[in-house]
Image (cartoon, rainbow, N blue to C red):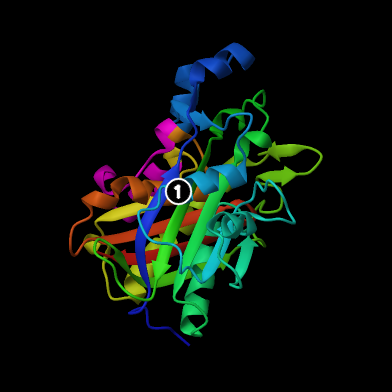
Amino acid sequence: MGLTFSSMFLNSISYYLPEQRISNDYFTDLSGISDDWIIERTGIKERRRAAADENTHTMAIEAVKRMDKDLSDVDLIVGATYTPHDTIVTLAHAIQNHLDVSDIPTVTITSACSSFINAAEIVEGYFAMGKAKKALVVTSEHNTAFSNDAEPKSGPLWGDAAAVSLFEKEPSPGGLTVKAIKSAGAANIGKAMDGVMLRVKTGMSMPNGKDVFINACAKMSNITEQILTENNYQLADLNYLAPHQANYRITKKVLSNLGLTAEKALSNIQYLGNTGCAGAVIAMGEKWHDFKAGDVVVSSVFGGGYSYGSMLMVK
């Protein structure tokens, strides 16, 4: 049964980027791959790296500190990450402790790089059941704690960052109305089980990047078109697409599949690298003050294990 989204609003986004910038020259010196080679295959020119005293929790707390809204009455926190600092005291617990709010639902989830959409869907459920009215979705990734810089296929991809989204049942000036959220999984196709992995003993690896690329392009394109069509919009109505920031070649292929111009894509992969489930949120946050009344915005994401999803918003 479908839900009405008239009472779900994305009212603010804040984010934190570590200060350290890692250029492509670092990887040239490390393993001999050139700047041109990295840019041609990924679009990435530089990425951010957490400092020695930073982690998934600290970056998220810094992002929360940058939120321009009163958070004292938050009644739901959903953390989203696949690079946890702690798997018992989770990301959401760290934010609850920082905000010093008691006796509210606090949960952390992972569905790889699509976790933002799934976290927003959890908020949707709490709102629909009347169990919450003001929720934080906290997306934070410490990719470089697990990646292997010397691995030429995937080493140059990863960046660190955190982003926080404030969802409420009441609108706020400057916010976006959430019209629909749609998620799915395709772990039964292709090389979903070993396309991209993060395992305790071996860290991050991407042995089947081509299969990830093919399925990411297809699924993100399809679900973008589906969520628009199912809610009586056309592709021509779309003003901005905030895709998962995995690889700029994926973004370009999705744009081509949908017949969209490059200007409609929000992109930060070039200077942040792949920041996991935080990337698309940061992209919307960077554009936040430029959205105009009536703008139609879609965020579409895809993650390892081949989970994917999309959210439709209107200014």
Res 181 → quadrant: bottom left
Q: Nearer the viewer, residue 82 or 241?
A: 82
Q: Is residue 266 magenta?
A: yes
Q: Nearer the viewer, residue 13 or 184?
A: 13
* Magenta extent: 250-271
Q: As shown in the figure, which amino acid type bears the numbered disc 1?
A: Lys
Q: Identify the secondary structure beneath mark 1.
A: helix
Kindly give the residue lying farthest to the bottom in the view shown: 1
For image coordinates 47% across by 29% down, the residue present is: 19
Q: Residue furthest right?
A: 201
* Residue 214 appears in the picture as rendered: no
Magenta-span inclusion, residue 62: no
The foreground one among 252 and 162 is: 162
Q: Position of residue 157 (x, y in %)?
A: 55, 33
Which residue appears at 38% of the width and 76% of the height?
A: 169
Instruction: Name the side, left or right, on which 84 lies relative to 292.
Output: right
Q: Which residue is mark 1?
A: 65
x%, y% of residue 59? 54, 42
Q: Quadrant of residue 185?
A: bottom right
- In the image, residue 21 above or below residue 160: above
